[in-house]
Image (cartoon, grey):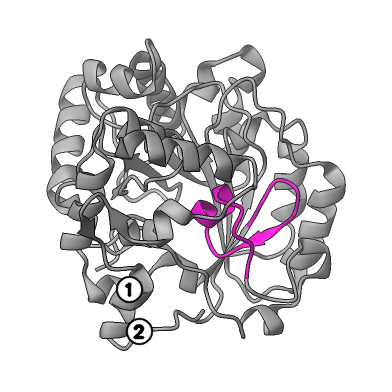
C-alpha cells in the first residue's frame, strides 16, 4: 500500500502537480521520520547557508549512451535535453566573472553534447584552476568519433572523474548494462597509456563508486585500496582516488526502492546514520548547479526534483553571485543521503 502511494505521488511530482509530499512530510506507515530541517535544527545548523562558492557544476544534457539502474538523472540514449550553444555562451560570461575555482561538467554523458569540445575549448581559456569532466568511460569506446577523447582531455588538462561501480565484470554489468565493464577497462587503459592516473602524474583520474543496492557505501579508504589492488593485478590499471557516493532516493534509484519495497527501510537507514559533522561540508554549501537549460539549483539532486534556488536570481542569464550567496539552501528528506555516515558529495565522503 505504501509503495503504491509513494509511486502515485512520485508520478504527480514528475508532472509538476505536487512538490515532494512523500519526501517532506516524514510519515511512513505507522512510523514518523524526522524532517531533515528539524534534524539540523537540533544541532544548530538550520537554516543551511552557502559558504564561499568554489564549484560551478554544469549539466550539459541528460543524453547518455548508458541506462544505469541507479541513475538519479534518469539519463539514457532517448533523452533529448541538451544544453544549447546560446546557454553555453551565457555560462561562459559567468565563468569569466565567478569567484569559483572549479568547473565541473556533468550529464548524462557530457561528451555527447555536440558543442562539448567547443565549450571545453572556450572554458579552458577563462583561468579556471580545476577543470572536471564526469565521464562514464564507455563513451570513449562507444563510437570512433569519441576514440580521441583521452587526447582531448590531456590537451586541456582535464581532471577526469569516471564511473566504475566495481572491479569485477558481474557487479559492474549488473548495475550499468552488459558489456560496460570490458569497455570501461579498455577506456581506463587508454587513459593510463597517455599518463592519466599514473603515480606522480598531473593528469588526474579518479573513479566513482555507487552501491548496487539499498545500502550505504563502505569505508572509502578501504574500498579505494581494494579497487587499486584488484585493477592493478588483473588489468594493470592505475588511478588516483576513489569517490564513494551514497545513492539518493531520487529518480531511477527511487523507482528501484519503491518497486523492491525498500524505500521506507532505506530512508530509516539514512536517518539512523545521520552525522551532523557531515552537514558542515555538504556540496550545496560551496556549489551552484546549472541545468541544461540554464536554471540554477543548490545541487544536481535538487535539479532533478525541480527545486530551483531560493533567490530572485534563478537563471544563468541573470547570474549574480552576491545575491546567490545570500540565500537559504533548499532542503528536504533526500538530504539525509548526503549526511549519512561519512557524508557524500560529488568528491566522495566529506566527514
Residue beneath the point at 38% across and 11% down: 179
Question: N-terminal of the two: label 1 or label 2?
Answer: 2
Bin the neighbour count of mark 2 within 10 Å (Cα to Cα): few under 14, some 14-19, many 20 and up. some
Quarter of the image where the N terminus is located: top left
Residue bearing the label numbered 2: 45
Residue placed furthest toward the bottom: 44
Q: Which mark is residue 279?
A: 1
Q: Is residue 338 magenta?
A: no
Stretch of the chain drawn in magenta: 290-309
Residue beneath the point at 73% across and 67% down: 314
Q: Is residue 270 visible?
A: yes
Q: Which mark is residue 330?
A: none
Residue placed furthest toward the right: 86
The main secondary structure of the magenta stretch is loop
C-alpha gap between disc 1 and disc 2: 8 Å
Horizontal and vertical percent position of residue 246? 30, 49
Amino acid at each position: 500500500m505504501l509503495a503504491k502511494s509513494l509511486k502515485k505521488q512520485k508520478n504527480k511530482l514528475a508532472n509538476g502537480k505536487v512538490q515532494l509530499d512523500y519526501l517532506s512530510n516524514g510519515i511512513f506507515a505507522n512510523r514518523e521520520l524526522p524532517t531533515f530541517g528539524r534534524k539540523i535544527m537540533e544541532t544548530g545548523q538550520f537554516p543551511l547557508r552557502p559558504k564561499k562558492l568554489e564549484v560551478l557544476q554544469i549539466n550539459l544534457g541528460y543524453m547518455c549512451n548508458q541506462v544505469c539502474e541507479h541513475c538519479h538523472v534518469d539519463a539514457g540514449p532517448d533523452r533529448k535535453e541538451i544544453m544549447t550553444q546560446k546557454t553555453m555562451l551565457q555560462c561562459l560570461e559567468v565563468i569569466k566573472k565567478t569567484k569559483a575555482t572549479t568547473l565541473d561538467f556533468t550529464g548524462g554523458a557530457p561528451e555527447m553534447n555536440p558543442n562539448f569540445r567547443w565549450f571545453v575549448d572556450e572554458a579552458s581559456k577563462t583561468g579556471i584552476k580545476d577543470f572536471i569532466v564526469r565521464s562514464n568511460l564507455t563513451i570513449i569506446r562507444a563510437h570512433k568519433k569519441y576514440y580521441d577523447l583521452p587526447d582531448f582531455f590531456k590537451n586541456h588538462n582535464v581532471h577526469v572523474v569516471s564511473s566504475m561501480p566495481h572491479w569485477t565484470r558481474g557487479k559492474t554489468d549488473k548495475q550499468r548494462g552488459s558489456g560496460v565493464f570490458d569497455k570501461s577497462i579498455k577506456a581506463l587503459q587508454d587513459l593510463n597509456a597517455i599518463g592519466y592516473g599514473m603515480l606522480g602524474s598531473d593528469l588526474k583520474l579518479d573513479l566513482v563508486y555507487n552501491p548496487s543496492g539499498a545500502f550505504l557505501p563502505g569505508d572509502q579508504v578501504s574500498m579505494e585500496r581494494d579497487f587499486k589492488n584488484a585493477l592493478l593485478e588483473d588489468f594493470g590499471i592505475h588511478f588516483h582516488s576513489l569517490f564513494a557516493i551514497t545513492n539518493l532516493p531520487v529518480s531511477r534509484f527511487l523507482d528501484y526502492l519503491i518497486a523492491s519495497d525498500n524505500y521506507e527501510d532505506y530512508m530509516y537507514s539514512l536517518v539512523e546514520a545521520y552525522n551532523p559533522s557531515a552537514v558542515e561540508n555538504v556540496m550545496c554549501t560551496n556549489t551552484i548547479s546549472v541545468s541544461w537549460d540554464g536554471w540554477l539549483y543548490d545541487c544536481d539532486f535538487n535539479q532533478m526534483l525541480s527545486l530551483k534556488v531560493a533567490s530572485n536570481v534563478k537563471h544563468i542569464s541573470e547570474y549574480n553571485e552576491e545575491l546567490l550567496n545570500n540565500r537559504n539552501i533548499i532542503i528536504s528528506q533526500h538530504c539525509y543521503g548526503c549526511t549519512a555516515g561519512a557524508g557524500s558529495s560529488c568528491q566522495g565522503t566529506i566527514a
